[in-house]
Every structure is written in C-alpha cells, then in structure tokens.
Image: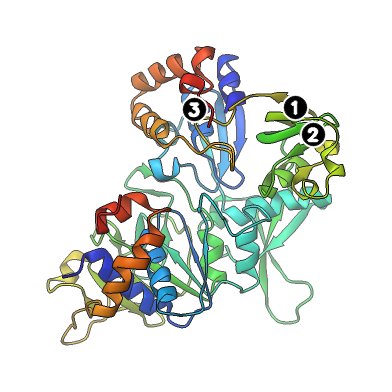
Amino acid sequence: MALVRELIRKKSRHLKLLGVPVLGMCADLLIGAGCVAEVESSAVSLGEAGLAPRFTEAVENGEIKMRDATCPAVHTALQASEKGVPFMPLRGVLGSDLMRIRNDWQEAQNPFSREKDSILLVPAISPDIALFHARWADEAGNVWVGRRRELATIAHAAKQTFVTYEELKPGDMLEDELLAPGVISGTYVTDTAPAKRGAWPLGIAGVYDIDDAHLAQYAKAARTREAFQRYLEEFVCTPAKSYSPASSPA
Amino acid sequence: MHTREELLACVVARLIGEAKHVAVGAASPIPATACELLKARGQDLRVSMLHKRKGNPFTEGSRELFDLAGQGRIDVFFLGGAQIDGEGSINLVRADGKRFPGSFGSAFMYSVVKKTILFREEHSKRVLVPKVEFVSARGTPGALLTGRALFSWQGSRFRLESTHEAGDVRGETGFDFQSPERIPLTPPPTEEDLALLRSSVAQRIAPDYPDFARRVWGIN
C-alpha cells in the first residue's frame, strides 16, 4: 500500500495491473486516482467490505479496459514464465464465456491422448514489474514472505521486482534453515525499501491485522467521486497520515 | 424454533454427505457452519477454509487450492452467482448493466471438483434467470440451494425437491424446472443438531465469522 500511495502522489498514468489472482483496495485506489488504463484479474473486490466502487464505476463507464481471467489461469501463466516455457495447459474453463473474450487462450487436443481430450493452453505472462510488501528483508537482498508463495511466483516471473518491508534483518536469511523456505532469493529482487506498516490498512500475517474499520470507511467513501477525492487528500496526499492512524504499533 | 440459517446449514450438511474434503470460500458462513456440524457429529472431515485469517491450510500460496482441486482431492465446493440459470451456469461478471467482481476460480472449480453445490440465499427472478448474461462457469451441479428451496439436478434441468416454507416457488423463479405433484417441506433441524449448532459449532464459527455468529446465536 505504501508503494501504491506513492504511485498516486507521483501521478502515474496508463498502468496495466495484473491481479494474482485477484485485486482489492490497491487497485481500487489506483483506478480511482486515474492511474490505470487496463486491468487483468480474476476479480476485483474489497472482500468482506463489498464491491470495489471505483473499479465498478470505471468498468461500467468504459473508462478502463477489463480483461477477465480465472484464478488458476493467472497462476499457470506465471508458472510458465517461471519455467521459461511459452505456455502451459490447464484443466477446466473450456465451457466458460471467458474462452470467448480471451483471444489469447487456446483450446487444444492433449497430444498424449488417443481419445478426444480438449485442454486449455494459456500463454506465459511476464509482468514488467512486480510490487509487494514483505515482513523482512536482509542485508543480502533477500526478502521473507512466509507461506505467501504466490509472491515468489510473481517475483520469479516478473522482469523487475521491488519489495517494501517491515523490518531489516542482519545477515543472510538463506543461512537460517527455519526461515529459508519462506524466503525469496535476492536473485529475483531488484531492490527493497523500508516501509513500516507499509501494508496498512491491509494486514501482514503475524504482525498486524487488516484494519476492518478503515476498510469499511474506505468502501463507503469510494462510493462517490467526491468522497473518494477527500479520502485521497486525507490518507494518500498527506504523507504523515498515510501509514496508519496514530501510527500505533500492532 | 430454529433460524433460517440453522435450517440451511443442516441442508448443506446433508448435501455434503460422506465427503472427506470440503473447501469453503470467502463469505460462506452457512457452508462453514454445515462443515463444523458434521465434524461435531463425529464425521472424519477435512475442511479447507480458504480465507481463514489465522491457520490457513495452504503453504504453497493461493494456487495450492486449485492444484488440489485439479488432482481431484477436493470432494465438495460451493459456488454462488449474481445470476444462476436453469442450465446450472453461473454469472459473476456482469448483469443488467452492472459490473460484479469477477469469476474468481469458478471457471476451473466447477468442472474439476467432484460435487459443486450452488448456494445463494436470495431466491428471486433477478438471480434465478432462464439464461445468464455471461457464463463465468458451467458444470454439473450437485444441487442448488436457496433461502427458499432445494433443487436437485436431473441431467439437463433442475427438479424442485423441497421448500423451506409453503409458497409459490415457481412464481419467484425465473427458470423452468421439474416439480413433484406435492412439494414437501424441507425437514427442520433435529433437536440433536440444534443443540450442537448452538454450543460447539457456534463457538468454532465465531472467530472467522463474527458478524454471522452475533446475528444467529448472539455471540459477542
């Protein structure tokens, strides 16, 4: 979120967002602030806080291009990039209207089957830039994301990866057998920057919880352009307030 | 007396039957309650709650659920929809000029999970339509349960099995369906199930679905 707020302050434009596999408040903020031209995602919502209002209005008014996907297709397309192969197969999906609107997806015959066996092929996706927030970075340039292994897949597939983090650890986390399985090696990380409570108002497992009250406040504000603008001015354009309310530790 | 939520949870428990592994998505307190009820009755059931804030069952990221399902390791899954049609297709993308969040994993899950139960509390012509505007996912539904009625799937169309209260289900449903001459009432929860729901099940549901537990059982 800290990076998203900075992108808005810097007046980024014409971004293409990829949801892995879905998007939420980050995307809704960027769309409402006019930073986004196109979204590819399996869904965009605020979860328990309901619809993502700026996304919904922008799509209904044709202000952004939406490329609908389905969760495992996004994962599979990134896994193809991880392996350096041009496409990967995936079961299911063939009966969906997604096949009509996704000209880049192909239905093919399983070459290993003598019987008719149709399967979906999705082309590899390699995002230009991956952005996410991690609990720890270390002096060797590694980051720790724990069980959030989809973040590793994004980093492996992307051309450049920038990570904000809560805390810096001395040394090299890959030398710690307990930490290493949750680490993304510095091989895949272009650069890191500290951002204390950088996920707020979202949470980071084991450090601080999602700020449900703030998310509900945002969901309400984002219903109109005017209230959304006031939200941006208060919580995004004023850096002092953009990290957390009263910056209380979790 | 029982609440509507308790009745629906008991119906879902019956539909899950002897399954070994059920996955429950976000914002699904009633399916989650049904799973906890089966466990409280002593059934050996693995429940993967996808949006648990603590103790999430997956360690390979959010693709693991889909990999599990693709291998056939998930027996039962639940899907809803902004629209559900008489052919069992669901729409999570757009309807009546309105945009909805999107298809999530439905296009995949519907065809790879052994039994997909369609569940939507709202029962209206707006939701239950002859044909969805956009097919997010197509498949063979195990059943369709609404806040009003239970339907089974008869190969190409739904059959009304029971209503939770007497009334004109056909008049409230946008698609055509088979129907018995006399429509039975959905059996109410047993005393044993109600006792379990209101004690151990309620306590186990409250941490992940606090609003639901407060509304149905007054747990704060």
Of helix, strand and loop, which one carries label 1? Answer: strand
Left or right of residue A129: residue A6: left
Left or right of residue B95: residue A152: right
The residue to which callout 3 is attached is A29
Picture coordinates of residue B209, whole percent (x, y): 38, 53
Q: Would residue B131 be visible to someone looking at this image?
A: no
Pointers 1 and 2 in contact (C-beta within 8 Å): yes
Query: What amino acid type should be assigned to the residue bearing mark 1?
Result: Thr
Of helix, strand and loop, which one carries label 3? Answer: helix
Q: Chain of mark 3?
A: A
Q: Residue at x 37, y 60 (%)?
A: B203
Badge nearest the viewer, 3 or 1 = 1
Pointers 3 and 1 in contact (C-beta within 8 Å): no
Q: Chain of mark 1?
A: A
Residue closer to the observer: A43 or A192: A192
Numbered tag placed on residue A192 in the rendering: 1
Q: Residue at x 61, y 73 (%)?
A: B73
Picture coordinates of residue A40, whole percent (x, y): 58, 41
Quarter of the rendering containing residue B117: bottom left
| Image vertical order of residue B114 relative to residue A102, above or below | below
The residue to which callout 2 is attached is A189
Query: What amino acid type should be assigned to the residue bearing mark 2?
Result: Val
Query: What amino acid type should be assigned to the residue bearing mark 3?
Result: Leu
